[in-house]
Amino acid sequence: MAEARRRVIITGDGPILVYGPVDVEMPDGTRVRSDRTVTALCVCGRSRRRPFCDTSHRRRARDNSRQERDP
Ligand code: FES
């Protein structure tokens, strides 16, 4: 039986959102499973829960906007 096509959303400054359960293969070959309805994958490299997003990317965006206001 063919698997259903998954929906993937690439957000601007945040994670990649994958709809449906996923198995993520890491660089060392291990697999990390997520059974969540939507899985957020970190692309900024700051998450402490990699490969999953822990919203640390928001801190960088906030820091950058603060620097723009207070040079
Ligand atoms: S994309 Fe959210 S912590 Fe990296």
Image: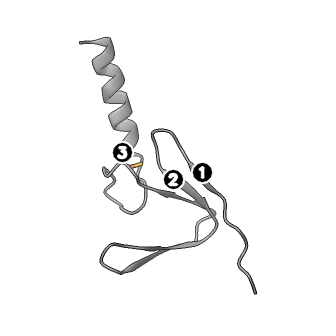
CB under 8 Å between discs 1 and 2 = yes
Q: Which one is in front in this view, the residue at disc 1 or the one at disc 3?
A: 1
x and y, in percent, of residue 4 in the image? 73, 73
Color encoding of the figure = one colour
In this view, which residue lies farthest toward the top?
70
Q: Is residue 67 left or right of residue 25?
A: left
Under tag 3, what secondary structure? helix
Amino acid bearing label 3: Ser
Q: Which residue is mark 2?
A: 16
Upstream in sequence: badge 1 or badge 3: 1
User: Looking at the image, which residue is at 32% across and 16% down?
Assistant: 68
Mark 1, residue position: 9
Type of amino acid at the residue the image marks with label 2: Ile
Residue 41 shows which numbered tag? none
Q: Is residue 9 left or right of residue 69?
A: right
- Does any atom of ligand 1 lie closer than 8 Å to the CB of label 3? yes
Q: Residue at x 32, y 26 (%)?
A: 64
Quarter occupied by residue 2: bottom right
Give the image location of residue 55, x and y in percent: 42, 46
Give the residue type at disc 1.
Ile
Q: Residues within 10 Å of mark 2 (few under 14, many from 20)?
A: some
Instruction: Residue under label 3, please give it.
Output: 56
